[in-house]
Image (tube, grey):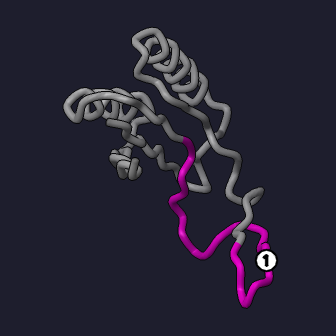
Amino acid sequence: MKYLVLIYGTTDDTWTGSDDDIAAVRALTELKRDLTGTGELVSSEGLSYPSSGRVVQVRDGVRVVTDGPFGEAKEQIAGYFMVDASDERAQEIAGQVSRIVGDRVELRGTLLAAP
């Protein structure tokens, strides 16, 4: 089954360029390499700052695009890992990511598409 590991950060500290940040990026890159080697990695990326994002929705048939940042939420999605693994293995991977980033992550299974 495919699982999404969502990595959260705050708008204040998502990336500061500190030694800890650089070490985390290196560790995440190594994890990405390991998961590629085992065939479990589907995709993984860090995301740009919320201020560069946009909300897109259709209202009355018209596409409306709103520039970020969004709302008052301080916590934002900073990146993700999409893995194809058993539930137990996905939890292990999520634990590795959490340990690397020093914060909680969210693990969500994908819905199976109809044939």
**Dot 1 crowding, Cα within 10 Å, few <14, some 14–19, many 20+:** few
| Secondary element at image label 1 | strand
Q: Position of residue 106 (x, y in %)?
A: 36, 48
Residue receiving disc 1: 63
Farthest-out residue, bottom: 60
Q: Locate residue 51 relative to residue 89 in the image: left or right.
A: right
Q: Which region of the structure is painted magenta? A: 57-79
In the image: residue 44, left or right of residue 103: right
Q: Who is closer to the viewer here, 19 or 101? A: 101
**Which residue lies at the image location 64% right of the left edge and 44% below the top edge?**
47
Residue at screen point 23% across, 35% down:
87
What's under tag 1, amino acid-wise?
Arg
Among the 4 quarters of the image, the one containing residue 97: top left
The x, y position of residue 107, in whole percent, is: 34, 45
Q: Residue lying at the far top in this picture: please name it.
A: 37
Q: Is residue 1 left or right of residue 80?
A: left
Residue visible at 74% across and 64% down? 54
